[in-house]
Image (cartoon, rainbow, N blue to C red):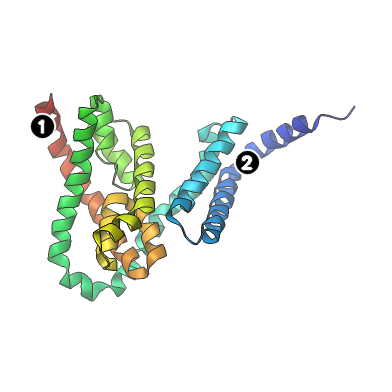
Amino acid sequence: MNAAPHQTLGEIWVYLAASPLLGLTLTLLAYQGAVWLNRRCGGHPLANPVLLAVVVLVALLAATGTPYQTYFDGAQFVHFLLGPATVALAIPLYAQLDRLKRMAGPLLVALLAGSLTAALSAVLVGKLLGASDATLLSLAPKSVTTPIAMGIAERLGGLPSLTAVLVILTGILGAVGAQGLYALMKCRDPAVRGFALGVASHGIGTARAFQVGEQAGAFSALAMGLNGLLTAALLPWLLPPLLRWLG
């Protein structure tokens, strides 16, 4: 007697799940499909490719009961490429070097203000809502790119896994809502738009900025890197006395 179709599919999935390349293949297919859908939607912010790909992958892993570690054994190749991809962002930034020099002063002020606002406002709101100290420490680096944010959270005594989720949510929210906010504020300068998006929404925001234009993407990449460095340097000094003061 032939096996039921669902049993056959289950056996195939178990066989495929044993391959470390399954996570990589699923990630690439999910993102490529999300990019296609984003283009079909005319690049609408709500059809953000990262958001769509994450939803598809989470649904698939939940439906098949696949542990995250099994998925990550293959997807870690994409994770490894984040480093070279980040370094490569220096190429479009170099093309904007002349304007960057002219704007150096205002950008440094904006970086300091944006970095402190992103971290401290999250901590204050979390405290008002009754969050635990561990949650507050996990919230603080939410606007920093994931590898740096998780390192900061671990050093402060937060929960790196929670920080990773918060970072992704922050990036998606920024990528989805930035254009509407810029229109409301009548902010049209692509350099200003990109820098603000990079400070607030790290890598996901930078990807969205590059969809808008190369200049916006270059300044967003700069902001993402500088915000990571500044946040890593300031938070270990600022947060402990702030939490003591808040009680």
Q: Residue shown at 32%/39% (left/top)?
A: 150
Indicate the amino acid at tag 2. Answer: Ser
Which quadrant of the view contains residue 88?
bottom left
Residue 18 visible in the picture: no
244 or 77: nearer the viewer: 244
Q: Which residue is mark 2?
A: 19
Quadrant holding the N terminus: top right
178 or 86: nearer the viewer: 178
Contact, mark 1 vs mark 2 (Cβ under 8 Å): no
Q: Residue shown at 25%/63% (left/top)?
A: 186
* Image mark count: 2
Q: Give the crowd class for mark 2: few <14, some 14-19, many >=20 residues within 10 Å.
A: some
Q: Residue shown at 41%/63% (left/top)?
A: 211
Percent x, y of residue 225: 27, 55
Q: Give the crowd class for mark 1: few <14, some 14-19, many >=20 residues within 10 Å.
A: few
Secondary structure at numbered mark 1: helix
Percent x, y of residue 111: 18, 55
In the rendered view, tell whether residue 6 sits above or below residue 231.
above
Q: Which residue is mark 1?
A: 241
Percent x, y of residue 76: 48, 45
Residue 171 vs residue 243: left or right?
Answer: right
Residue 38 visible in the picture: yes
